[in-house]
Image (spheres, grey):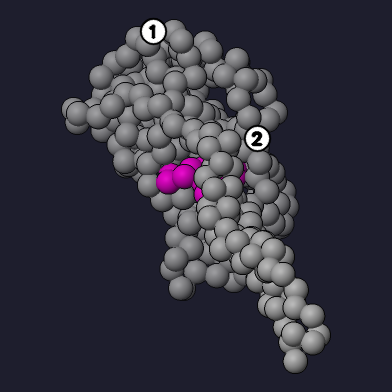
């Protein structure tokens, strides 16, 4: 009987150990996502919409969100640099978040103020976590894209535009933000913004009326459209941006609110988590081990003694 009890304790401890490990593994993917993170990016060009009834979105490894204004002189340097950016793995989303700009967009201002909590223009946000501020840092864009991992795009699929209805599949994330981009002439100089944000809608997955299989009608957004649609799967909140450049930034103050220009993202050390979980599991399994050792050391009684 004592032998059976010994094995019961032993296997109970093993089961508890495995359960803890499985729970930790299953939640690991969610723990990797922080507040405000961009999870995946896809896009559809007007050329597909013009010639096809079905448009399937393409994935992009990087997204560059540029915040500028037509009245901003240093922005001209950044825009000329962006115009020569020839990368098939990157999409550009240009925002005019200043109300003094003729092409001002309130959705862009919300992204400037509340999403990224920026203070200066020109500013460039890469993949929702890297920041380049000022015209001098903009020249580090190519290097920044090459030296940092892009978006995996594993969690967004089957983004299809058909009959002005957008459908999609996703595995994680809290919302899908759709940006309409158009080709717009610069207000004061002979220059064309190729990918300027002119409209935006947000599909909140917590809304019970939203169904990815039924889709969402975006016909109103497509009136007079001539550029690109960008689909951003992301979480609510504000990410902690960290600088992608060592250059001193030359900025123009844009927002009167007192906000930090640059935040540094704190990354967790996996070794620390491994040690913590090891100690927790040792503590959990210690009582079972002590009972098991006690049972082993106990002298066995003979048959006659037992009777």
Cα separation, mark 2 vs mark 1, equals 27 Å
Q: Which residues are magenta?
A: 31-41
Camera-side residue of 238 and 188? 238
Q: Residue at x 72, y 48 (%)?
A: 51
Query: In the rendering, which numbered label is found on residue 30?
Result: none
Question: Picture coordinates of residue 156 (x, y %)?
Answer: 63, 52
Classed neighbour count for the residue bearing mark 2: other residues with Cα under 10 Å, few (<14), some (14–19), many (≥20) = some
Q: Is residue 82 left or right of residue 188?
A: right
Q: Is residue 289 magenta?
A: no
Residue 281 showing in the rendered view:
yes
Camera-side residue of 254 and 188? 254
Q: Which residue is farthest bottom?
A: 307
The quarter holding residue 228 reads: top right
Question: Picture coordinates of residue 36 (x, y %)?
Answer: 43, 44
Classed neighbour count for the residue bearing mark 1: other residues with Cα under 10 Å, few (<14), some (14–19), many (≥20) = few
Q: Residue at x 42, y 11 (%)?
A: 135
Of circles 2 and 1, the one toward us is 1
On screen, 75 above or below 8? above
What secondary structure is marked by label 1? loop
Q: Residue at x 81, y 85 (%)?
A: 303
Query: In the rendering, which numbered label is found on residue 61?
Result: 2
| Quadrant for the N terminus in the image | bottom right
On screen, 239 above or below 170? above
Q: Is residue 117 left or right of residue 183?
A: left
Q: Earlier in the sequence, mark 2 or mark 1?
A: 2
| Quadrant for the C terminus in the image | bottom right
Question: Picture coordinates of residue 24 (x, y %)?
Answer: 59, 55
Residue 167 showing in the rendered view:
no
Q: Which residue is farthest front?
A: 304
Question: Picture coordinates of residue 233 (x, y %)?
Answer: 54, 49
What secondary structure is marked by label 2? loop
């Amino acid at each position: 009987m004592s032998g059976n009890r010994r094995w019961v304790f032993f296997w109970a401890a093993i089961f508890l150990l495995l359960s803890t490990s499985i729970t930790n593994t299953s939640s690991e993917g969610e723990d990797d996502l922080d507040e405000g993170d961009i999870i995946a990016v896809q896009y559809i060009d007007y050329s597909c919409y013009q010639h096809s009834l079905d448009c399937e979105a393409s994935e992009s490894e990087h997204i560059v969100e540029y915040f500028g204004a037509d009245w901003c002189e240093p922005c001209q340097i950044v825009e000329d640099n962006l115009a020569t950016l020839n990368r098939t793995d990157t999409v550009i989303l240009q925002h005019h978040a200043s109300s003094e700009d003729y092409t001002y967009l309130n959705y862009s201002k919300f992204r400037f103020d509340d999403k990224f909590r920026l203070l200066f223009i020109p500013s460039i946000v890469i993949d929702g976590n890297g920041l380049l501020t000022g015209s001098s840092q903009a020249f580090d864009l190519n290097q920044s894209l090459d030296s940092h991992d892009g978006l995996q795009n594993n969690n967004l699929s089957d983004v299809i535009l058909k009959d002005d209805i957008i459908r999609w599949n996703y595995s994680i994330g809290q919302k899908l933000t759709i940006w309409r981009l158009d080709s717009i002439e610069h207000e004061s100089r002979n220059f064309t913004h190729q990918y300027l944000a002119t409209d935006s809608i947000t599909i909140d997955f917590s809304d019970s009326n939203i169904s990815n299989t039924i889709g969402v009608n975006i016909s109103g957004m497509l009136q007079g459209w001539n550029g690109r649609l960008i689909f951003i799967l992301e979480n609510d909140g504000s990410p902690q941006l960290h600088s992608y450049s060592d250059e001193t930034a030359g900025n123009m103050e844009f927002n009167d609110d007192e906000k930090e220009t640059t935040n540094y993202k704190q990354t967790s050390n996996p070794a620390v988590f491994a040690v913590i979980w090891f100690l927790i599991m040792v503590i959990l399994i210690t009582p079972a081990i002590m009972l098991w050792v006690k049972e082993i050391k106990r002298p066995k009684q003979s048959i006659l003694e037992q009777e």
